[in-house]
Amino acid sequence: MKYPIEYDVIVVGAGHAGSEAAAAAANMGAKTLLITLDLFKIAQMSCNPAMGGIAKGQIIREIDAMGGYSGIVSDLSAIQFRMLNMSKGPAMWSPRTQNDRILFTKYWREMLEKTLNLDLMADMVTQVLVSRGTIKGVKTQLGTEIFAKTVILTNGTFLNGKIFIGNKVFGGGRIGEKAAAGLTENLVELGFETGRMKTGTPPRIDGRSLDYAKMTEQKGDEYPSKFSFSNQTKVLDKQRSCYITYTNPSVHDNLRIGFKESPLFSGVIDGVGPRYCPSIEDKIVRFSSKDQHQLFVEPEGWSTYEVYVNGFSSSLSEEVQYNSLLKVPGFENAKFMQFAYAIEYDYFPPTQLKHTLETKLMPNLYFAGQINGTTGYEEAAAQGLMAGINAVLKIRGEKEFILKRDQAYIGVLIDDLITKGVDEPYRMFTSRAEYRTLLRQDNADIRLTPISHALGLATDERLEKVLKKIKNTDLVLDFFKKTSVKPQEINPILEARNSAPVIQQMKLFKIASRPQLNFNDLMQLNQVSDFVQNHNIEDAVKQQAEIKLKYAGYIEKERLNADKLNRLENISIPDDFDYSKLLSISFEGREKLQKIRPKTIAQASRISGVSPSDISVLLVYMGR
């Protein structure tokens, strides 16, 4: 059957990547279809019921600034908010929400259904349709052919997915859901390279069976914030607590009993798992000298007793999981609601993609999310957003949209994938970003909202709010530079903060830069409190001004370094450049350059196996 409607964009899979891709494309005015196996599982939280965290929180704020939905949905479904790493500098601060799993999916579906130009369909895509070397649409398991100008594949862990629990192996993309078959084979026939990866998820436990008195309570922030910069959400007025407990030698001894039948150690699982989120059995082997491992007991929502045991991911048998977890303090009478399992699935090495996430091999075909070898909701959502934007720009014949490494964590993520490839599931960390002082969570709106507005995603209201934030921040900084304070006014505040008193009148700008003081300390000064009240200065502006005051030197230094590197970003390499003639370059360097075909000298310099001397030779051949 030929479907009667032809679309601009078809998005396959409605996980975090697919949902953001569909929303972006539709909001840019493209006629969009989102196809997924189950419309009641849209943006399902397959693993932990949380969004954000170290570096991931920055990504969610960037998605929000770009007009995506993840930040809004995270706020609407949040049951706890914490700003992580507050003891460190602002470049490391990372927002995180604990979420109601059911509400998260509910709000995502509601937002997608309210999005103009977007249709939803429940079916399985088994084939992409190709004509004259270009994507023309998709074919589903029902035999329906649906045509489109572009297709975005966001299949997550469903491509030939296999689930492992001890010696039990069965097909599935998630527990209780069937795997997607046929599409990998179709893509391989078209010439794509594929591989296998693994991930896992911990057990879910009935919280009524746990003794929380034996655990450490972890509350949310006393004064919580939120993800979205918009006025569509508000901060939480109540929160649910998480809890922390630990494994012990007795737990480890019980777990070792199941190693002989573990698919992880027996070779049954071929895929590579995430190094930074290992299974509990993997932790015991890799960190054999440790007597305990931390477990986070995370509630799954407002109105459920189900909890998620973060840190106890496993592929061991039900019996081993059960007997081992019961020896964890507080879990002596635990009742399982779902056993942990590992899942292995197909992925496609991302070096086969352009920075737009369009495939190099097949025009108008895009990959986003775990299909590219990443792990995490946030990394997937970011890719989906960028694929959706670029698919629409391609249709319009407009210039591609690529975020640079000094513009966003999203830019770092995609550049890492395309340039370096993956040999394990990719996870974002602050350490991956060279310019993390520039890429803070607090200024994501300032960095990206004007760009998003120009693309047609961020609303006029969003842009006006950002411009007001910038204006008021400059107003505060100007006030601090012009206003002086007398010793008798400021010294009591300084002494209370164990900061050296002053002996003469001094500009507020210099006082405010002291590490012991914060903006609220200075609010004790009448001139500061009057200024804030008269100009209606919001907390976000106070924070922005304080960071600029204290870290001005670091920010300027990083900006200069980024500008230097961007000069290399501006040196483009022709698409048809013949690397085989560069005989002075190492064989590995030529091989990697030929395979990845970097667009700029800067990208070439980041390819593993390409040395600085190789770059020098390349510049000579290009006449530079």
Image (cartoon, rainbow, N blue to C red):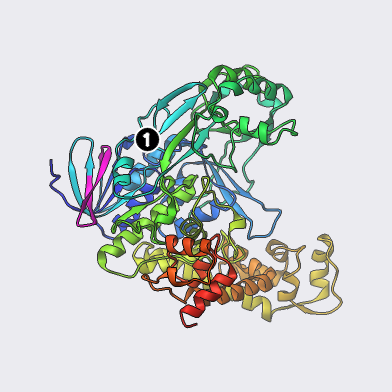
The residue sitting at 58% across, 72% down in the picture is 613
Left or right of 600 on screen, residue 255 = right
Residue 130: say if magenta: yes
Residue range in magenta is 121-138
Q: In the picture, which quadrant includes the N terminus?
A: top left
Residue lying farthest to the bottom in this orientation: 623
Residue 201, placed above or below residue 431: above
Picture layout, residue 472 above or below residue 218: below
Query: Residue 432: in sight, yes or no?
Result: yes
| Whole-percent x, y for residue 214 in the image | 71, 25
Q: Quadrant of residue 361?
A: bottom left
- Residue kind at label 1, given as amino acid type: Asn
Tell me if 55 is positioned left or right of 63 in this view: right
Q: Nearer the viewer, residue 485 or 224?
A: 224
Q: Residue at x 56, y 29 (%)?
A: 314
Q: Which one is in front, 542 or 566?
A: 566
Circle 1 residues within 10 Å: few <14, some 14–19, many ≥20: many
Residue 284 percent across, percent down from the top left: 67, 31
- Residue 184 x %, y %: 33, 41
Up-down relation of residue 591 to residue 311 (above or below)? below
Dot 1: element: loop
Residue occupying the far front of the picture: 583
Quarter of the rendering containing residue 257: top right
Magenta portion: prevailing SS class: strand
Residue 403 lies in the magenta stretch:
no
For label 1, the residue is: 160
- Which of the pair 610/75 is nearer the observer? 610
Q: Position of residue 496 (x, y in %)?
A: 82, 60
Which residue is painted at 40% across and 45% down in the image?
194
Determine the residue positioned at 62% across, 33% down: 282
Look at the image and tell me whether residue 68 can be seen.
Answer: no
